[in-house]
Image (cartoon, grey):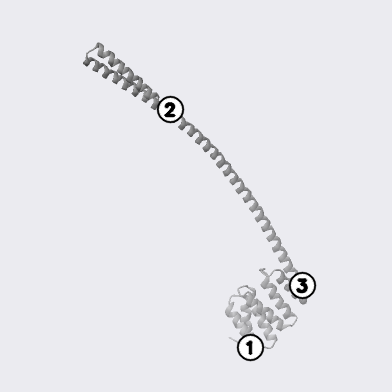
Amino acid sequence: MRASRFRLALAAALLAYAASASAIFSDDEARKGVADLKKQVERLEAQAADRRAVQELSGSLDQIRQDIARLRGQIEELSYKIDNLDKRQKDLYVDLDNRMRKLEAVEKEKAVQAAAAEQQSYDAVLNQFKAGNYGASIQGFQGFLQQYPQSKLAPSAQYWIGNAYYAMRDYKSAVVAQQKVIDTWPSDPKAADAMLNLASSQAELGDLNASRITLKALVQKYPNSPAAEQAKQRLARAGVK
């Protein structure tokens, strides 16, 4: 609206100037005056347009500055939240690590206590065997196996059950007990001793052929064991090669 009014005013001025100029000056002079005036009008319009452009640009720059300030505030807020989150994560990690260490320490302590209780139980029953209380030792080792079926001492407990039966001259039960050691824990060192006791029980039952077969199998299966050396000596005395 302003530009239109400005142009109308300038046009009116031009017409008035032209009318007055035609009355005073010649046509050429009037035309030249009108042309000069038009140039002045165009220059004024260009200056006005430049001012509007500058004003619009200034307004855009103000808006951009406001947007930048708002974004900077958002970035600072996000940065603060990230820093807090990172700190909380570190605190949680440290707390979790401390809890895990405490739990591991408790579990280790429990494992040590359990192993100690297990060993004490085994030793107590073995002392019964050493004292000649074979029946009590059989019951004790059977109870031990029920309580600690996965114990590393389980093969030895079963072996001593067989030995206790042998000491009580219950050779059939001794055969069954020692065969269980051989079948259940073939890789345990007590398996070789169990085979030697098995051969002894078979001999006591009068089955010398089975006893020799067991001794030969012992030498073949566990050649480097002390029980294999005793088996070789027994076979040699029996004249078996």
**Which secondary structure lies at badge 2?**
helix
Please tell me which of labels 3 and 2 falls first in the chain: 2
Q: Nearer the viewer, residue 204 or 74?
A: 74
Mark 3 lies on residue = 128
Question: Is residue 237 among what the camera can see?
Answer: no
User: What's the amino acid at mark 2?
Assistant: Ser
Counting the numbered discs, the total is: 3
Residue 234 horizontal side relative to residue 125, left or right: left
Question: What's the mark number on residue 58?
Answer: 2
Q: Quadrant of the C terminus?
A: bottom right
Image coords of residue 86 (percent x, y): 57, 44
* Residue ID at (65%, 74%): 190
Q: Nearer the viewer, mark 3 or mark 2?
A: 2
Question: Is residue 123 among what the camera can see?
Answer: yes
User: What's the amino acid at mark 1?
Assistant: Asn
User: What's the amino acid at mark 3?
Assistant: Gln
**Which secondary structure lies at badge 1?**
helix
Please tell me which of labels 2 and 1 falls first in the chain: 2
Q: Nearer the viewer, mark 2 or mark 1?
A: 2
Residue 77 horizontal side relative to residue 8, left or right: right
